[in-house]
Image (tube, grey):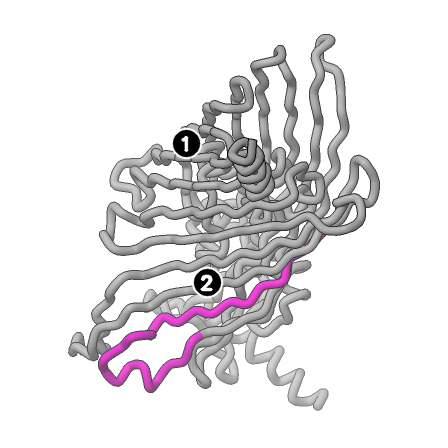
Amino acid sequence: MLKNNLILVCLIAISSNIFGQTTMTKDELAGQLNVITTAVPFLTITPDSRSAGMGDAGVARDPDINSYFWNVSSMAFLQKKAGIAFNAAPWLRQLVPDVWYYNMAMYSKVGRRNQSVITGSIRYFSLGEIQFTDEFANTMGNGTPYELAVDLGYATQLSENLSLGGNMKFINSCLTCGSSGTIGSNFKPGKAAAGDITVYYKKPIKLGGKEGKLAFGAAIANIGNKITYSTSAEKDFIPTNLKIGTSLNTKIDDHNEITVLLDINKLLVPTYPVYMKKADNSGDSIDVNGKKVIEFGKDNKDVSVISGMFSSFGDAPGGFKEEIKEYNIALGFEYWYDKQFAVRAGYFNESKTKGDRKYATIGVGIKYNVISVDAAYLQPFTSRHPLQNTIRFSLLFDIDAFKKQKDKDKDTKSK
């Protein structure tokens, strides 16, 4: 065994000297494109129009029905007993006309003092109709692929300021569903079970003599098994994501209040390493015993989900300068007038080498009795961006207020 290891080390050393070439330094690598990719990226799409109008910030926001996605722990402090929300958005409308994202969420307070909450949601991502082809561009039939996630969550108050919670979810990614050709027999739907762990803390404060609230939130979302779409294919990580954020709310007077939010996000998924290339300018990687030789970074292809989460904090090939670029920042602003009309704005920033999502958002919200309506618009800073002109809509129902209104109408009629 020792002899074989020594031979392998010698082969790598010889390959490095004869066939390999170092084309750039770590500092130069930090400026190169190296996007982290995962399976089922639809899990990271903002489902609700409220946070969509605030730059996709929301882990520490004041809770509502759609907070299950951001931080289910915050929902333990909801005052209403039950609610349901519907969200919809055309997706990548600059590229395709028939891709849509749909979401339904609901909750109910439980416990003797309503200090806990049970939540549920369904997310459906329709990819429209796709024509499948083989490697020779021969038609293999059409299909209607889709992706689905079903969530069930629970959160409870630990004190008047602190709450903990989590979600469990089932994920089904059917990228060849509805195929009328033979492709469907060669592939299978990708399936995964995952969970979220969340915490939320809020504290009343005074700002210039005005009442306010400072809140902090953190969540690790989509901790789950890897996905594969065939028996022979390698398994891919799902988008395990760390979200940390804060919000500051102040009431200007009895009718006006504003909130400022800041979120920091990072995918807890390994970064691709840089493999050593042959010196013949072919661009081919050096193989030793059928395994590519890594020049920069770490070999995380076969690591477990938990190991990948921890290694993701220090595995970027470009070192710290590249690692820090894997953190996204979302800034949000929300203004409410008389708790009935809201105006929102936000900004989202992602490094150019990690996806280059940079966009501004605006949004509005209206509350009327038992119904709330939210809308959001996204405008990227680059032309011809796939997310350009993205519009989202949300409809929220306060079931508790609906029941009270119904009882009130009955009393009025009886009189």
For residue 40, the mark is 2
Is 168 in the magenta? yes
For residue 361, the mark is 1
Q: Nearer the viewer, residue 382 or 93?
A: 93
The residue positioned farthest toward the right in the image shown: 159
Which region of the structure is painted magenta?
A: 165-189
Asked if 273 appears above or below 265 in the picture, the reply is below
The residue located at (70%, 32%) in the rendering is 215
x then y, percent, for residue 380:
35, 35
Quadrant including the C terminus: top right
Is 40 in the magenta? no
The Cα atoms of the two marked residues, 2 and 1, are separated by: 24 Å
The residue located at (43%, 47%) in the rendering is 87
Q: Amino acid at mark 1?
A: Thr
Q: Nearer the viewer, residue 247 or 87?
A: 87
- The answer to which quarter of the image holds residue 194 is bottom right
The residue located at (38%, 41%) in the rendering is 392
Q: Nearer the viewer, residue 109 or 3?
A: 109
Q: Tell me which numbered mark, 2 or 1, is placed earlier along the sequence.
A: 2
The residue positioned farthest toward the top in the image shown: 209
Residue 44 seen in the current view: yes
For residue 390, the mark is none
Q: Amino acid at mark 2?
A: Val
Q: SS at mark 1? A: strand
Quadrant including the N terminus: bottom right
Would residue 357 be found to the left or right of residue 332 on screen?
A: left
Q: SS at mark 2? A: loop
Crowding around mark 1 (Cα neighbors within 10 Å: few <14, some 14 to 19, many 20+) is many
x then y, percent, for residue 133:
21, 75
